[in-house]
Image (cartoon, rainbow, N blue to C red):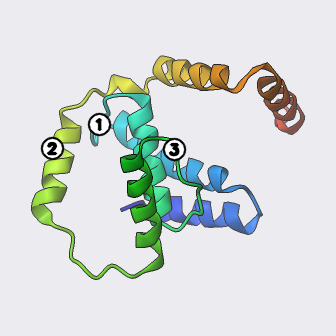
Amino acid sequence: MPERETIERAQEDAREGKSPSTQAGEFVREEIHHVREGKHGASSPQQAIAIGLSKARRAGVKLPPPKGSPSTRKKAAQDSKASKQPSRKKTSKKRSRATLGALQRKSRASVSRAALSRQGKKSAAKRGKRARSVAATKASRTRKAA
């Protein structure tokens, strides 16, 4: 379950008309903080991001389905559906505990500054030169004054 502040920040982004990916970024940020503070680990930066996006979908952020495998798309559809209807089933304590136990055995280094930087560069490299240029130009325009 996401923290109340995270949901409030995402709702504020939605009110300001920001994109769903910006709203979901709050959940990803929370997940990265959880790993950094030792609540649990992650096997890679991608896993931490995926957990955050899943939480965002469950909280009602209208994210498009991922371009991954059919099982990943199915899980994303499940998460989106879960946001629309009230939870009827009580969460299984055994399953929750097992999930947390598995995550606690994972590495905390997966969301280090270096690991996240590598992930960002890899992701940007896939997008192509023009897209990177446009993103950098926009970043320079919207950057706060130092």
Give the mark nearer the N terminus: 3 vs 2.
3
Amino acid at dot 1: Gly
Q: Which of marks 3 and 1 is nearer the N terminus?
A: 3
Relative to 12, say whether 121 is above or below: above
Q: Measure the C-alpha gap from mark 3 to mark 1.
A: 14 Å
Q: What element carries label 1?
A: loop
Percent x, y of residue 35: 35, 37
Quadrant (top left/top right/bottom left/bottom right) for the C terminus: top right
Residue found at x 43% / y 43%: 50
Q: Does residue 32 appear anywhere in the picture?
A: no
CA distance separating discs 2 and 1: 13 Å
The residue indicated by pointer 2 is 101
Q: Name the image quarter holding residue 43.
A: top left
Q: How crowded is mark 2: few (under 14 residues within 10 Å), some or many (20 or more)?
A: few
Number of marks in the image? 3
Residue 87: quadrant of the picture? bottom left
Residue 38: numbered disc: 1
> Which residue is drawn at the image coordinates 53% and 68% (left, top)?
60
Residue 99 visible, this angle: yes
User: Which class describes the residues within 10 Å of circle 3: few (<14), some (14-19), or many (20+)?
Assistant: some
59 or 30, nearer to the observer: 59
SS type, badge 3 = helix
Image coordinates for residue 5, horizontal then vertical, percent: 51, 61
Which residue is at the front of the view, 121 or 109?
Answer: 121
Q: Position of residue 141 (x, y in %)?
A: 90, 35
Q: Mark 3 points at which residue?
A: 29
